[in-house]
Image (cartoon, rainbow, N blue to C red):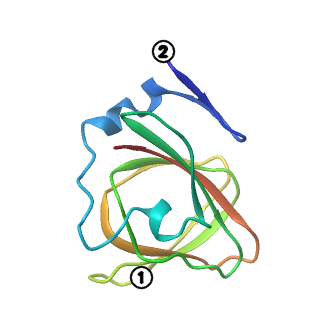
Amino acid sequence: MQTFTGRFINVTLSTVTLLGATGMALAESSPPSFIASPEIFKVISENERYRIIEVTLNAGQRSQVYAAPMRGVYFVTDCALLRHQPDIKSRESFDAAGRAAVKDAISSQSTENVGKSICKFVTFESK
């Protein structure tokens, strides 16, 4: 079993295996997060099947529009986010540090930190 070690957490491939069968092809019109906003989304580890991305949003910072497959998310800090999607109303969320969740695939979204402090989280996605 392969283990990835990052600056924040250790994770084994078995943790994200469920994502491999349910990933989606990214929409042609929106690039992956790490291409759209490389200053926010940094690939910290990957292999032929999985990618781990460290996300850092400063207070008030907003990403460019991107697409993402179904993914696991682990919040390193508290995060107050506003997610902007073209076909639905923008959604605000608060995720406490230590929270983990599986997020649905998105074809087009930008993410904004509406909190007063830096927001950090890690995503685990299949390719």
Residue in the picture at 41% in, 37% down: 50
Residue in the picture at 49% in, 60% down: 34
Determine whether the residue tagged by mark 2 lies in a helix, strand or loop. Answer: loop
Asked if 105 appears above or below 31 in the picture, the reply is above
Determine whether the residue tagged by mark 1 lies in a helix, strand or loop. Answer: loop
Side of 64 where 55 appears, left or right: right
Residue in the picture at 65% in, 46% down: 98
User: Which residue is the site of mark 1?
Assistant: 90
The amino acid on which the numbered mark 1 sits, given as a three-letter code, is Ser
Q: Position of residue 49 (x, y in %)?
A: 36, 34
Side of 120 where 87 appears, left or right: left
Q: Position of residue 118 (x, y in %)?
A: 73, 67
Q: Position of residue 11 (x, y in %)?
A: 57, 30
The amino acid on which the numbered mark 2 sits, given as a three-letter code, is Met
Contact? badges 1 and 2 (CB < 8 Å) = no
Rate crowding at label 1 as few (under 14), some (14 to 19) or many (20 or more) other CA atoms within 10 Å.
Answer: few
Q: Nearer the viewer, mark 1 or mark 2?
A: 2
Residue 1's disc is 2
